[in-house]
Image (spheres, helix red, strand yellow):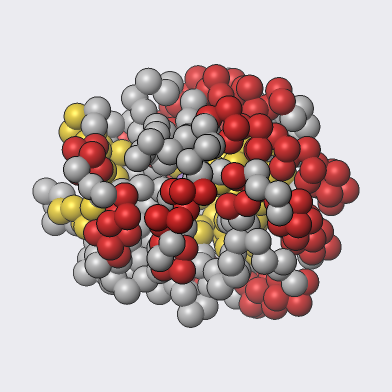
Amino acid sequence: MEMTMRWFGTGFDTVTLKQIRQVPGVTGVITTLYDTQPGEVWSREKIRALKEEVEAAGLHISGIESVNIHDAIKIGSPDRDQYIANYIETLENLGLEDIHMVCYNFMPVFDWTRTELARKRPDGSTVLAYTQAAVDALDPEKMFDSIAGDANGAILPGWEPERMAHVKELFEMYKDVDDEKLFANLVYFLEKIMPVCNKYDIKMAIHPDDPAWSVFGLPRIIINKANLLKMMKAVDDVHNGITFCSGSYGTNLENDLPDMIRSLKGRIHFAHVRNLKFNSPDDFEESAHLSSDGSFDMYEIMKALYEIGFDGPIRPDHGRMIWDEVAMPGYGLYDRALGATYLNGLWEAIDKNAKRG
Ligand SMILES: [Mn+2]
């Protein structure tokens, strides 16, 4: 594996490349062109400029998170082929710039959903949290307003104000899309892009829906092992793979995380490893990465990744806000750096143990 951190780009991220370079063991960043809209073609020039900036800081681009999918593709509307053609052009430009891993998601309307961006924990840190009762009590159109106020002025990934201004229209557009239709639209998209992925060896890594169940009655498909295996089989190409995000699959306590990892050997191209603390099955908060701070056994998760020979990029995921840092919720420097260091420590121990037999 390669340890990386997510970086949103100069002007969007409070964390600098220089700071990331100083986190021990981190050699790459996972980044994006944060000012592009879903459906837009990424030019080679823009990709190259981003790459040069990262490399000038002594790091490299380990993959893209995300190249977002236009709603027309997810809905399967008549204009989807044009947006798929644009997506293919973006993939081609990424391939020409020697970038070989692309994370994306296939969630309708909302990206990840949390009901609080700054829940206070006993140690005084603040974290993102989710409670089903709050979602059930909420008008989906107000979801954006309810969380935007806590974002420290940052634009949250997947919650771009331009899209959220049209939430009502988006719901209307998805009204005939159920789980089966969404799955068929995903397969249609993957079949169209596989040739360019094969040509440039670009590994597509779908990110799970978060939380891993339906919210506001919207369809959700990337939620469990059965659906993932169905997706792998439907487009049986190594370039059709997944992002294993422990914090997203872990929202559903029925998901056995190490077992899922072992079942997906060879198709996990990217890993997000973080912990959650459950107060009840319907209420969780994002804890520190350490096993003892949350509900997951992080050693078993890392061991499963090690045992399947995972060699892609891995990153700590949402961190707590600590030491008075002001940053995009989940994406401060300090707690993610602690997370990266902890995950590197687990990996070193697992590796040394395995080699000693
Ligand atoms: Mn994730």
Rendered residue at 72%/66% (across/down) = 41
Front residue of 89 and 253: 89
Q: Is residue 61 left or right of residue 287?
A: right
Residue nearest the observer in this picture, 177 or 121: 177
Q: Residue at x 41, y 57 (%)?
A: 167
263 left or right, relative to 330: right
Q: Position of residue 105 (x, y in %)?
A: 56, 46
Quarter of the image for residue 134 reads top left
Image coords of residue 20 (percent x, y) = 49, 67
In the figure, 191 relative to 253: above or below? below
- The reply, left or right, for residue 33 in relation to residue 130 is right
The answer to whether residue 295 shows anywhere in this view is yes
Residue 274: x and y in percent read: 39, 42
Taking 282 as reference, is 135 above or below it? below
What residue sits 63% from the left and 22% below the top?
Answer: 230
The answer to whether residue 246 is visible is no
Q: What residue lies at 71% left-to-right and 23% top-to-bottom?
A: 233
Q: Give the image location of residue 149, x and y in percent.
A: 25, 67
